[in-house]
Image: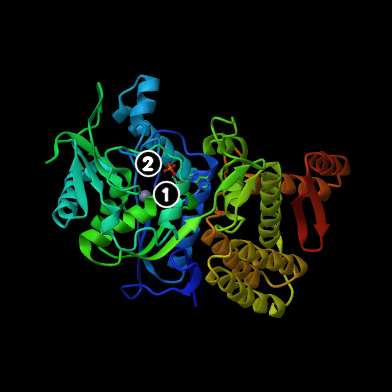
Amino acid sequence: MLKIYNTMTRQKEVFKTIEEGRVRIYTCGQTVYDDVHIGNARTYSSWDVVIRYLRYKGYNVFHVQNFTDVGHLTDDADQGEDKIEKRAREQKVNPWELVDRQIQEYWQVIDDLNIQRPNISPRATALIPDMIEIIQILVEKGYAYEVEGNVYYDTSKFKDYGKLAKLKLDEEKAQARVAQDPLKKNYFDFALWLNARKGDQIHTMRWNSPWGEGYPGWHLECSVMGMKYLGETLDIHCGGIDHIPTHHPNEIAQSEAATGKKFVNWWMHAEFITLNGMKMSKSLGNYVTARELIDEHGGLVMRMGLVSGHYRSAVDWNPQVIENAKSNIEKIRNCLNAIDQTSGGSEETLKGSIKNVKNDFEEAMDDDFNTPKAFGTIHEFIKKINSSLDNKQEIFLEAKETLLELLGILGLDFTKKEESGEIKLNELMDLIINIRNKARKEKNYEISDEIREKLTKAGIQLEDTPNGTRWNITS
Ligand code: AMP
Ligand code: ZN
């Protein structure tokens, strides 16, 4: 029985879909003005594990994740500038060009991290007519008002505003220090549509609307893109914890006021990543892109590091995370290699373990996608395999298949032989072992010993067993 933590109720709840066997899921996507950083990468990897596991359980998952390519301002209180227009101006490029470039960069990172692409990845700018239509509905229903070419959502009209964030509206209002937009009627009101002209500046990305030339607000975009492709009520909606106080309450207010229906059944939020114990921030110089790390360590190591912790636990990204990921990968590789090289023996012990590991893995994942526990079951299984290496070949093939399947749910693809410049080690080792065996047959021990010594120095240990020669990576 799968239980998922729902931020709305602050509890783990037994998961039920709206339509039998089908999951409609929306994940808040990248604001495409900058490279994917390690925090974004962790959040997307977490949702990838969720989706892969739901598919493994037999659900037909339909996943939509947007690109925010307009309307995300530098300040959540609708002050400041559009992040994309600002960056484009700094780089002296057209905003459309910046967006295109960042989307290409995004896909490369996602593919390298073995994150499955969504079924639909809409750009906010492709749905402007749908957004205008929803704003018109909100204005007609009395939930929105226009001031000087901007349209604001009137939060005083929506009964449960702030329910998700558990906002104590009066207290928050008194404590908040963000600069207020003087055009708003109420403190928590937010922009659905923004006037393209601000002072003597004109927004490059702008569209005609009943309120003049302008562009949509970030919060509205996600409501519209979610409902357009997934229907008025979604099974699951995901985002980082930064979306709990403003972005997601605003999405709920807009969607539910427009449709009169519940917008989302399960709200899932991923914790933030810190870097070497500090908040990740460009201004502090404490910032690292996913690309840099993938280029340095490879996608598999990065993926292992990103999904080892639970998505609701804060994780600190430091050199130890990479070291642990590398050592776990080495253990798995050695086990898979040992399976390829084994033969003979009885199969009873391993048969039981294959069944157990699947049950234990599922039990861990059914508990709000507990990946650290799931990894624990995989490591136990590897120990079991390693300690019964004289079993029959067929049962090992089954063990290998199980291991690869469970790792695959976590997005760890050990079927690919090449990983960012790594040589095809299996083939190469087969070749070296064959040459060494020939030398031994011809009693040329000088050559066979030299091969063994050189490999030991290179971090590969050979072991001659009655069933042939095995190899292990030791460093
Ligand atoms: P953005 O491009 O800022 O809109 O963020 C894209 C996604 O990454 C959102 O779901 C954010 O909640 C998430 N995110 C942003 N910063 C971090 C971080 N430091 N750790 C984890 N997730 C983050
Ligand atoms: Zn969103």
Q: Residues within 10 Å of mark 2 (few under 14, many from 20)?
A: some
Q: Is residue 88 left or right of residue 35?
A: left
Is 402 or 297 nearer to us in this picture? 297
Residue labelled with disc 2: 77
Task: Quote the CA–CA distance across marks 2 and 1.
Answer: 12 Å
What x and y, as percent, mark residue 469?
Answer: 77, 55
The picture quadrant where one finds residue 421 is top right
Residue visible at 44% across and 39% down in the picture: 108
Q: Is residue 196 left or right of residue 406?
A: left
Colouring: rainbow
Q: Amino acid at mark 1?
A: Lys
The yes-or-no answer for disc 2 within 8 Å of ligand 1 is no
Could you tell me which secondary element the residue under label 1 belongs to?
A: helix
Q: Amino acid at mark 2?
A: Ala
The yes-or-no answer for disc 1 within 8 Å of ligand 2 is no
Residue visible at 57% across and 60% down in the picture: 407
Of the image marks 2 and 1, the number of the one nearer the N terminus = 2
Is 161 or 252 nearer to us in this picture? 161
Q: Is residue 62 above or below residue 43?
A: below
The picture quadrant where one finds residue 284 is top right
Is 257 or 335 nearer to us in this picture? 257
What x and y, as percent, mark residue 151?
Answer: 21, 43
Residue 401 in view of the camera: yes
Residue labelled with disc 1: 173
The picture quadrant where one finds residue 309 is bottom right
Could you tell me which secondary element the residue under label 2 belongs to?
A: loop
Question: Disc 2 or disc 1, which is closer to the eye?
Answer: 1
